[in-house]
Image: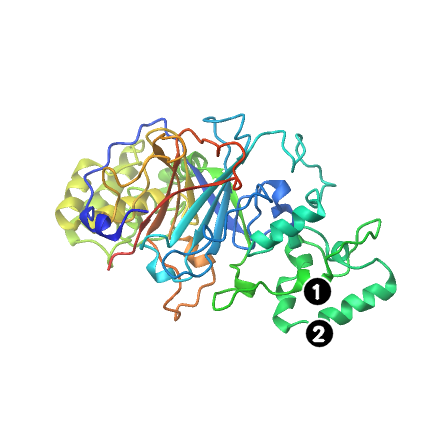
């Protein structure tokens, strides 16, 4: 992460190069998982919150790597994205990115407060079958007892304890043992009930495996709260949500089709106001895309927009992906740089307002910046220290995600950002053979909200 002083020197970056037309973006949306066990590591999930579904469950990041350099406290797990790329298809057959943020959420711009780790595995590896999991594969292949202990020792979230149904980590499958488990759970701290292994793995308390086999780990250990205090969410976790990925082009096509259907019904300029963000009267080129700034636009801009809407109604087939030159000129004359930048941001986002992730690993992809300040300048994104390849933008976290984190608005430590932009090794290199950790740290650029 660049220093705070470097960030000050690059407060206003030069105009970005135009993004190539062939760039295709994928958008991430969150929803509550219907079957939480589908978010366990053997399903290679993309998700927000919960415990990390580690790709390599044994060669985990060190405690130092999982510590906020700003506060010295454990990092909060924010999200992970499963994203194999063509840059290294053999060693990176499975590839996942893990994003962590500081519990001091209002200070994410400071060095070491946001950390990103990349892990990848070949198709043939010790942890997963070379074939996709079937519907019967509800839980990951269990680790050896010694590996389970090593993973639990290294992992502050003890994700391995969430990978088996509750009965599978009990002393036995007999009815008397079930009563002992029930009594043990009743004697555990009350808050532990919200983060049991059964709930996080998608199994109901008391569900067992077919054989009723035993394990050395008592059930109450799996049900105990994580050893963390002073952070949001049960046991120090954000609510677990599934990331659903869809192409941005799909939403653009939907909007264009909606425009074609509604144009013959228009008899004049559309009514003012922001309206719906998708479909209907509002979209890129409409008032809703421009009025997302500080309470609206100047009167001359509004008049220019009304004239544009009238032209669309009369002439039909116009390029509605951008405002015509007269409207753009009016906007640029009337709006400050922050308003113009936010208008462009809103226009692009309005295709799919609920997006929380924008993902693209293609060369030339440019982040969608909500504001002109605080962008990286030349030299601010260092090359990969492992192989020397340049880093390239891979994904960005949108400010919309903050809405889904169920934050306490009165908590000064709640996280806040304009966007988080992840830069990763363009070669997607692997750690040297024999290294203890399978996770390589990448770079996240934090654009803070405007002061």
Residue 151 in view here:
yes
Which residue is identified by label 1?
A: 220
Residue extending farthest to the right is 175
Q: Where does residue 401 sit, x and y in percent of width and height?
A: 43, 53
What distance separates the C-alpha of mark 1 from that of mark 2?
9 Å
CA neighbours of label 1 inside 10 A, class few (<14), some (14 to 19), many (20+): many
Residue contact between numbered discs 1 and 2, judged by CB atoms under 8 Å: yes
- Of 117 and 392, the residue lying toward us: 117
Q: Where does residue 156 sit, x and y in percent of width and height?
A: 55, 56
Instruction: Name the mark on residue 165.
Output: none
Q: In this view, does 446 lie above or below 15?
A: below
- Circle 2 sits in a helix, a strand or a loop, which is it? helix
Q: Where does residue 80 sit, x and y in percent of width and height?
A: 50, 46
141 left or right, relative to 119: right
Q: Where does residue 57 sit, x and y in percent of width and height?
A: 60, 44
Residue 36 in view here:
no
Of the image marks 1 and 2, the number of the one nearer the N terminus:
2
């Amino acid at each position: 992460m660049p220093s705070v002083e470097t960030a000050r020197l690059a407060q206003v970056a030069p105009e970005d190069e135009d993004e190539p037309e062939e760039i295709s973006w994928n958008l991430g949306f969150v929803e509550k998982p219907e079957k939480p066990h589908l978010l366990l590591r053997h399903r290679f999930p993309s998700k927000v919150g919960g415990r990390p579904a580690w790709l390599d469950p044994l060669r985990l990041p060190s405690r130092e790597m999982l510590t906020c350099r700003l506060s010295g406290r454990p990092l909060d797990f924010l999200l992970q994205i499963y994203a194999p790329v063509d840059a290294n298809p053999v060693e990176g057959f499975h590839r996942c990115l893990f994003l962590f943020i500081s519990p001091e959420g209002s200070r994410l711009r400071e060095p070491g407060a946001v950390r990103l780790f990349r892990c990848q595995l070949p198709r043939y590896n010790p942890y997963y079958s070379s074939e996709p999991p079937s519907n019967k594969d509800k839980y990951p292949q269990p680790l050896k007892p010694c590996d389970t202990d090593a993973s639990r020792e290294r992992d502050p979230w003890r994700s391995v304890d969430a990978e088996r149904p509750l009965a599978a980590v009990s002393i036995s499958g007999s009815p008397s043992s079930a009563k002992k488990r029930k009594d043990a759970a009743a004697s555990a701290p009350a808050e532990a009930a919200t983060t049991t292994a059964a709930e996080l793995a998608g199994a109901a308390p008391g569900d067992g495996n077919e054989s009723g086999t035993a394990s050395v780990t008592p059930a109450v250990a799996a049900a105990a709260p994580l050893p963390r205090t002073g952070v949001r969410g049960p046991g120090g976790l954000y609510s677990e949500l599934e990331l659903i990925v869809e192409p941005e082009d799909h939403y653009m096509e939907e909007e264009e089709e909606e425009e074609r259907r509604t144009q013959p019904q228009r008899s004049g300029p559309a009514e003012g106001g922001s309206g719906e963000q998708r479909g209907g009267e509002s979209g890129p080129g409409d008032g809703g895309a421009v009025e997302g700034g500080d309470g609206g636009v100047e009167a001359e801009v509004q008049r220019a927009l009304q004239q544009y809407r009238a032209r669309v109604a009369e002439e039909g087939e116009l390029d509605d992906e951008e405002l015509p030159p007269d409207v753009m000129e009016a906007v640029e004359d009337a709006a400050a740089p922050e308003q113009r930048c936010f208008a462009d941001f809103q226009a692009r986002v309005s295709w799919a307002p609920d997006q929380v992730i924008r993902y693209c690993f293609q060369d030339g992809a440019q982040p969608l910046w909500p504001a002109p300040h605080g962008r990286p300048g030349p030299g601010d994104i260092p090359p990969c220290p492992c192989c020397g390849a340049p880093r390239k933008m891979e994904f960005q976290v949108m400010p919309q995600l903050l809405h889904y984190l169920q934050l306490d608005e009165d908590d000064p430590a709640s996280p806040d950002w304009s966007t988080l932009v992840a830069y990763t090794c363009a070669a997607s290199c692997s750690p040297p053979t024999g290294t203890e950790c399978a996770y390589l740290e990448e770079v996240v650029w934090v654009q803070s909200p405007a002061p």
